[in-house]
Image (cartoon, grey):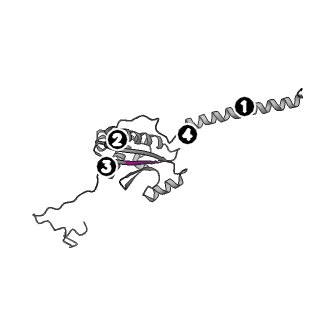
């Protein structure tokens, strides 16, 4: 069976259009994978932590859940995720604390972002949970004054959040003997009822 020239041209054009569409799909996928940040930070390595942060992780016990709440195109998402991964790896080496990481894009996971918002997360940042308690570190505390990610500020904020969350309740004592007012004194001027 012999093809007519018109059908031959149509078949050739259709074949090349399919090949170009496949090549375009492959190149688009490769481009997006390279340029759009991936919320899975397992491929990032460790960054060194300060002695203070390491001491906090060494003296902390239990399980801490850290959730990074950032949109994929946020310039803070990758460095913050890398820093959280470093915290988790250092905690794992210490052995007394386990830190699990999760990542939420508030524009995609609306239910997860809403759930964390009811627990106290306000916008983008890092949400820490431990033994029924939680604390939120907003993205501004991970940046310098110009809104750019700052490793020292971010590390200090996350370490302080872990310490604040896991140190337990603070016991307050009261010493008497040198004319201090009693803690039962209800006088508004000299008593400690407000305290």
Closer to viewer: mark 4 or mark 2? 2
Where does label 3 land, which residue? 163
Residue 125 percent across, percent down from the top left: 44, 49
Q: Is residue 146 something one can see in this rendering?
A: no
Where does label 4 land, which residue? 36
State how far apart marks 3 and 2 are (Cα).
13 Å
Residue 53 percent across, percent down from the top left: 31, 42
Where does label 2 land, which residue? 91
Mark 2 or mark 3, which is nearer the start of the sequence?
A: 2
Where does label 1 land, which residue? 19
Closer to viewer: mark 1 or mark 4? 1
Local secondary structure at mark 3: helix
Magenta span: 64-70
Residue contact between numbered discs 1 and 2, judged by CB atoms under 8 Å: no
Q: Which of the pair 92/174 is nearer the observer?
A: 92
Furthest-bottom residue in this view? 187
Residue contact between numbered discs 3 and 2, judged by CB atoms under 8 Å: no
State how far apart marks 3 and 4 are (Cα).
33 Å
Image side of residue 35 versus residue 7, left or right: left
Q: Residue at x 46, y 37 (%)?
A: 42
Residue 106 percent across, percent down from the top left: 51, 51
Disc 3 residue crowd, few under 14, some 14–19, many 20+, Cα 10 Å: some
């Amino acid at each position: 069976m012999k093809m007519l020239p018109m059908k031959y041209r149509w078949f050739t054009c259709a074949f090349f259009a399919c090949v170009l569409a496949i090549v375009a799909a492959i190149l688009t996928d490769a481009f997006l994978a390279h340029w759009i940040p991936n919320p899975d930070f397992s491929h990032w390595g460790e960054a060194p932590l300060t002695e203070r942060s390491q001491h906090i992780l060494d003296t902390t016990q239990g399980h801490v859940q850290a959730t990074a709440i950032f949109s994929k195109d946020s310039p803070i998402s990758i460095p913050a995720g890398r820093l959280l991964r470093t915290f988790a790896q250092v905690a794992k080496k210490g052995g007394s604390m386990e830190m699990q990481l999760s990542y939420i894009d508030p524009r995609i996971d609306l239910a997860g972002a809403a759930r964390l918002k009811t627990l106290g997360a306000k916008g983008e940042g890092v949400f820490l949970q431990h033994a029924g308690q939680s604390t939120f570190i907003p993205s501004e505390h991970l940046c310098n004054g110009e809104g750019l990610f700052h490793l020292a500020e971010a590390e200090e904020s996350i370490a302080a959040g872990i310490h604040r969350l896991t140190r337990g309740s603070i016991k307050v004592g009261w010493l008497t003997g040198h004319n201090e007012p009693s803690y039962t004194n209800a006088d508004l001027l000299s008593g400690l009822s407000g305290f």
